Image: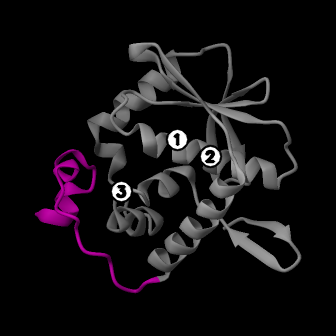
Amino acid sequence: SGLIMINEAEEIKYVSGTIYSYSFLCDRKVWLSYHNLSMEQESELVEVGKLIDETTYKNERHNFMIDNIVNIDFLKKNIVHEIKKSKKEKQMAINQIKYYLFILKNHGFEDIKGQLNIPKIKYTEEVILNDNDIEDIKNQLDTIDKIIKSKNIPKPINEKSCLKCAYYELCYI
């Protein structure tokens, strides 16, 4: 896994943007995803998301990889764009964009912003990283680190969102 130096005293490990965003939803999904028990390739919703990604913003630089861990949908004029299929998990998407901005900042990128794009409803929202966000992200990464290092799989959350999750069968059947 990749490491970024914040300063000499503090070292931060980071995870994929997907795992980072999962951490706001379900610890079990974080653990399963990190340990490569992914069933997402079988999920129709994921296929729809990939299709939207491949057919929108065709002229932009897609899938900008950082340290073989973080995959940004596209980057243009110092704006990190994240493309989503619906507004349903808007806050998770914003958290994910802030995470990307955090990593880019740690790689020396200055004056960089984010933008959430939902093509289906022609929605865009600017996303900016502030000092409070940086602290929140460091705390979230600590939480994720504890989840993925645990020998025990976290319990299912039994939420309505579970029904559409790619891991549903692994958790409940």
Residue 125 part of the magenta segment? no
Mark 2 residue crowding within 10 angstroms, few (<14) / some (14–19) / many (20+): many
Residue nearest the viewer, comparing 129 with 93:
129
Residue nearest the viewer, comparing 134 with 145:
134
Cα separation, mark 2 vs mark 1, equals: 6 Å
Residue to which mark 2 is pinned? 98
Residue to which mark 3 is pinned? 25
Residue found at x 43% / y 24%: 51
Q: Position of residue 117 (x, y in %)?
A: 52, 24
Q: Which residues are magenta?
A: 150-173
Residue found at x 44% / y 22%: 52
Q: Is residue 158 above or below residue 99?
A: below
Cα separation, mark 2 vs mark 3, equals: 16 Å
In this view, which residue lies farthest toward the bottom? 151
Residue to which mark 1 is pinned? 94
Name the residue type under label 2. Lys
Answer whether labels 2 and 1 touch (C-beta < 8 Å).
yes
Say whether disc 2 or disc 3 marks the residue closer to the N-terminus: 3
Say whether disc 1 or disc 3 marks the residue closer to the N-terminus: 3
Q: Is residue 86 left or right of residue 80?
A: left
Residue nearest the viewer, comparing 18 with 129:
129
Q: Position of residue 128 (x, y in %)?
A: 67, 39
Cα separation, mark 1 vs mark 3, equals: 13 Å
Q: Position of residue 116 (x, y in %)?
A: 54, 29
Residue found at x 50% / y 79%: 146
Query: Judging from the image, what secondary structure is the residue with disc 1 in?
Result: helix
Quadrant of the frame with the C terminus: bottom left
Residue found at x 68% / y 53%: 68
Mark 3 residue crowding within 10 angstroms, few (<14) / some (14–19) / many (20+): some
Residue 156 part of the magenta segment? yes
